[in-house]
Amino acid sequence: MQDRTRDTSMTGSEQHETDPRLGAVSFAERMIASEGFTALFREGMGLVEATAAYLDGEGRNDSKVLDRTIALAYASESMRLTTRLMQLTSWLLLQRAVNEGELTRDDAEREHRRVVIAMQETTLATDVFSQLPERLQDLITRSQSLQVRIHRIDQELKGQAPVQEALNPVAGQLNQLAAAFGRK
């Protein structure tokens, strides 16, 4: 018979991390409070600055020489890009405010409900997208990558991240053993 007693000499957080009955450790919460978040924040703010500089400078010149169809795609995609970046910036700033003690997690969640991180995919055909200026293509691709990462973290913070057994092959085997012995 398995001993189900816990070591009471452990702190609450140690018990939480080691006792499966207390739930899983949220890697997203740890990431938000780490240097990883600082790097993510800098990446996001750097992307906002690079996008603004491009769209207000070189991008204006690039858009003037495009044919009508591609110019329309440029306008549409640059609007999607700026909307995406505004959503991501809002999220990043809220998380930083929580880290710095300016907001509680609950306050940040209430504020965050006003701005949804909507997963936006480009609606352009590949051949049209490939005719956009390379710099705009790069900014769009980088913003989409950042959006996917932030969306994943946000979903986990809300407890909505799907468990992916494919990332943990041992979990699948353990589940099969538990089912075979009638414990699942």
Image (tube, rainbow, N blue to C red):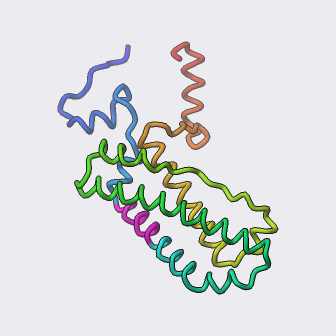
Image quadrant in which you'd find residue 105: top left
Residue ID at (49%, 54%): 150
State yes or no: residue 22 in magenta.
no
Residue ID at (66%, 55%): 121
Q: Quick check: 73 above or below 118?
A: below
- Residue, far right: 127
Residue 81 is left or right of residue 89, and the answer is: right
> Where is residue 153 drawn, in percent x and y?
46, 49
> Where is residue 79 drawn, in percent x and y?
60, 65
> Where is residue 179 drawn, in percent x and y?
58, 18
Predominant secondary structure in magenta?
A: helix
Q: Quick check: 70 above or below 21?
A: below
Residue 81 is left or right of residue 8, and the answer is: right
Q: Nearer the viewer, residue 97 or 9?
A: 97
Residue ID at (56%, 15%): 181
Image quadrant in which you'd find residue 147: bottom right
> Where is residue 117 drawn, in percent x and y?
51, 51
Q: Nearer the viewer, residue 40 or 16?
A: 40
Residue 124 is left or right of residue 153, and the answer is: right
